[in-house]
Image (tube, rainbow, N blue to C red):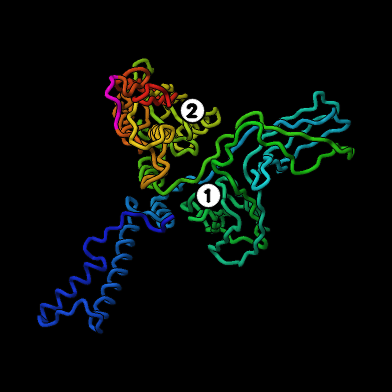
Amino acid sequence: MALFGGSIDYTDRDFDALRARVFNLIRSAFPTWTEDSVANFGNILVESFAFIGDVLTFYQDNQAREAFIVTAQQRKNMLALVRALDFKPKGQSPARTPLTVTLAAPPVGDVTISAGDKFSTLEVTEPLVFQAIQTIVILAGTNPPIGTVEVEHSDSRSETFTSNGLLFQEIVLSFTPFLDGSLAVSAADGPYTVVSNTLSTSLSDRHVTVRVDENDRAKLRFPGAVPVGSISADYKTGGGVRGNIDKETIRKALRSYTDQFGAPQVVSVSNLQRAGEGLDRSTVQAIREDGPASLRVLTRTVAREDFEIMAESVPGVVRATMLTRNERAGIPENQGHLIIVPEGGGLPTQALKDAVLVQVTVTFPQTLTFLTTVMDPSLVTINVSTKIVLQPNVLASVAASSVRENIRTLFALRFASGPNAGGKNPAMNFGFALDGLFSYSDVYDAVRDTRGVRRMSDAPDALLLNAFSHDVALEPQQFPALGTITVINDDTGLPI
């Protein structure tokens, strides 16, 4: 991965341009010097000056670009810029799933599955490890001897530091990636409360702030009371989309179990549901979009756009739309339907909807007379059928695979690559935001511009969306979702 992005503007200040300008200056003063291609000492000096100028202007361009939110590319600089806005980017979130624990036979004594117990997938190299986040007990005589425990893709960490007795001291946690909301800090003088800012912190308050750097390493700062003695920090690391694994893939317990009398127990485990809610940290492009938007809502949620911004600030929400009586007839006065789409698409969990409701009614409270209901999107499945003419010497299967990939990219909720990687894909939104139409031409362009496709078929059904060759109409609350993709070779008339 390149250290710098590709948008640096050299204008006319690269090596060749600077060299030419220096020689033009020399000729204006010394018309008789024409040996600009000979390896003499004068030319060596000129090219050395041009090289130094090239390097200096590179860094000037880069520093100028990295000074603004709209152009910054390096994560370190972007974090520093949005920190001035008091904006905290989303960190990684761990995938979670219920895990079924089965004993080989009804136990004689109680069997305890403790919080922190670890379970893993069966890969030989780099298995994914999940830990229990609650304690359950399979009681003696239970038949069938089965229990269910919630597990998450994370690892619990605990570190101890010695206070230096100074005001505003800082400590850096050793393990990464730090999971937001998992920190608990205490010292000899008692527990410390994690706060997002220090506006209300006095020198007697046991407060601690957390700042996560570009390497996902957390730095703790004590802005109030000075910790006494040893400082204990308990937190979690891990998370990310790699934890969103299929059902029945967590199959191994990483410790042995006994009942309360010490009798060994044979334990088998399996996740009967797919693990979900695992999210990667916000990309630079996502921070670029979300940081300035955070200035819109300071303490309360009032306007329709405020609801959407605050809903999308909840980890796991990628799209939100707020519909009132003004946008959709039938919604009662002074009520709103806040519709959300989770990362990855589909329908949101009840836990995610509850978190959004807390965000817009408690954390950033709405007006007292307004009633908000958080709802599922109405998904409109769009089936795509296309006929293509292949370029010469191109395998039909390769071209068809590329067509399908381009269509999936068009329907992705976020850009996976390119200069806007991690940013929101504006082509995928609610009917209200898309003026009630999902664009036929966007799909047409995605297919036509695929590598290996010479052109689209001349037939009227060269591209069909839900069996029609026009835009797909969407109601305000409806959200497009990709269905089946059928690619047909126009020369043979057969699916590829």
Tell me the kind of residue under disc 2: Gly
Residue closer to the observer: 465 or 402: 402
Q: Residue at x 80, y 27 (%)?
A: 145
Q: Which residues are magenta?
A: 455-460
Quadrant, the N terminus: bottom left
Q: Horizontal and vertical percent for residue 420?
A: 37, 45
Q: Residue at x 21, y 67 (%)?
A: 17
Pointer 1 local density, CA inside 10 Å: few below 14, some 14–19, many at least 20: some
With 388 as the anchor, is 381 left or right in this view? right
With 126 as the anchor, is 356 left or right in this view? left
Q: Quadrant of residue 219?
A: bottom right
Tell me the kind of residue under disc 1: Val
Residue 346 is marked as: 2
With 309 as the anchor, is 343 left or right in this view? right
Q: Is residue 403 visible?
A: yes
* Image: 252 above or below 162: above
Residue 451 is marked as: none
* Image: 438 above or below 421: above
Read off the residue under disc 1. Answer: 195
Q: Horizontal and vertical percent for residue 308?
A: 39, 33
Q: Residue at x 60, y 33 (%)?
A: 246
- Of the numbered discs 2 and 1, the one sitting upstream in the chain is 1
Q: Quadrant of residue 204?
A: bottom right
